Amino acid sequence: MNRQTSTSRSVTAGCARCSIEWTTPNAQAVAARHHDSHGHRTWVEQILTIEYGTAQPVAEQPGLFG
């Protein structure tokens, strides 16, 4: 089967003590390095999005709900 797939990831990290957030693609590494160098507790949130198929909406999908 040949299926068109698209994957994207967004990362946000931060340090509550410094009141700072990082939103770059390498935010997880920045948070880890910040913890290593300053000893602060840091956090990281990651969102992984996977899409299957094309971005073209289908006008009608007969039989989908009936």
Image: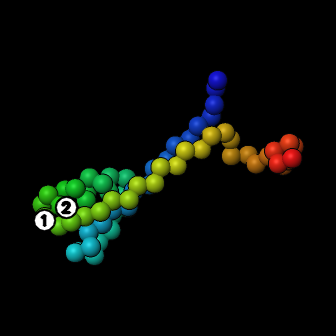
Q: Residues within 10 Å of mark 1 (few under 14, many from 20)?
A: few
- Give how far apart the Cα atoms at labels 1 and 2 are: 6 Å
- The disc at residue 17 is none
Residue sticking out furthest to the front: 66
Residue 24: give x, y in percent of width and height: 36, 57
- Residue 53 against residue 8 in the figure, above or below: above
Picture quadrant of residue 38: bottom left
- The disc at residue 34 is 2
In the displayed structure image, the side of residue 40 where residue 62 appears, left or right: right
Q: Secondary structure at mark 2?
A: helix
Q: Residue at x 82, y 48 (%)?
A: 65
Q: Residue at x 33, y 59 (%)?
A: 44
Tell me the kind of residue under disc 1: His
Q: Secondary structure at mark 1?
A: helix
- The disc at residue 38 is 1
Residue sticking out furthest to the top: 1
In the displayed structure image, the side of residue 49 where residue 2 appears, left or right: right
Of residues 54 and 52, which is closer to you in this image? 52
Residue 10: give x, y in percent of width and height: 44, 55
In the displayed structure image, the side of residue 51 where residue 48 appears, left or right: left
Q: Residues within 10 Å of mark 2 (few under 14, many from 20)?
A: some
Picture quadrant of residue 42: bottom left
Quadrant placement of the N terminus: top right
Residue 28: give x, y in percent of width and height: 30, 54
- Residue 46 against residue 55 in the figure, above or below: below
Q: Residue at x 26, y 69 (%)?
A: 15
In the displayed structure image, the side of residue 22 where residue 48 appears, left or right: right
Q: Residue at x 56, y 41 (%)?
A: 6
**Is there CB contact under 8 Å for labels 1 and 2?**
yes
Tell me the kind of residue under disc 2: His
- Residue 44 against residue 56 in the figure, above or below: below
Residue 55: give x, y in percent of width and height: 68, 46
